[in-house]
Amino acid sequence: MAITVKLGSPFRRHTGGADKITSAAPDLPALFGDLESRFPGLTKHLVGDNGEPRPFLNIYVNEEDIRFLGGKNYKFADDDEVLLIPAVAGGSN
């Protein structure tokens, strides 16, 4: 099984510029472990001390928010596309 993981541009400084990787992780916790083994230090930007994804990290699987698919309990399927992007906020008064 293989999934494609696309990384938002703010995370690429931790991946040597890589914007996409392939992983065999079966679920989100395993994906975070795979990312940490490949890019030490990256997951501190993705996961809090409690092991949960950071509040301002958006995770999409095949363009659907992973929270609506079961969150970290969702089991990836072959050829899933996972997008990890930070939430963006801002505006003007």
Image (tube, rainbow, N blue to C red):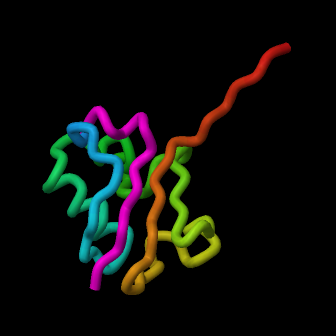
Q: Which residues are magenta?
A: 1-14
Q: Position of residue 11 (x, y in %)?
A: 36, 39
Q: Nearer the viewer, residue 63 or 36?
A: 63
Q: Residue at 27% x, 67% y: name it.
A: 22
Left or right of 19 on screen, residue 23:
left
Q: Position of residue 54 (x, y in %)?
A: 47, 47
- Say how many tags the image has: 0
Q: Nearer the viewer, residue 75 or 4?
A: 4
Image position of 65 with respect to 48: above or below: below
Residue extending farthest to the top is 93
Magenta-span inclusion, residue 13? yes
Image quadrant assignment for residue 21 = bottom left
Q: Position of residue 39 (x, y in %)?
A: 18, 47
Q: Residue at 25% x, 76% y: name it.
A: 24
Q: Which quadrant of the figure contains the N terminus?
A: bottom left
Left or right of 34 on screen, residue 50:
right
Image position of 42 with respect to 10: above or below: below
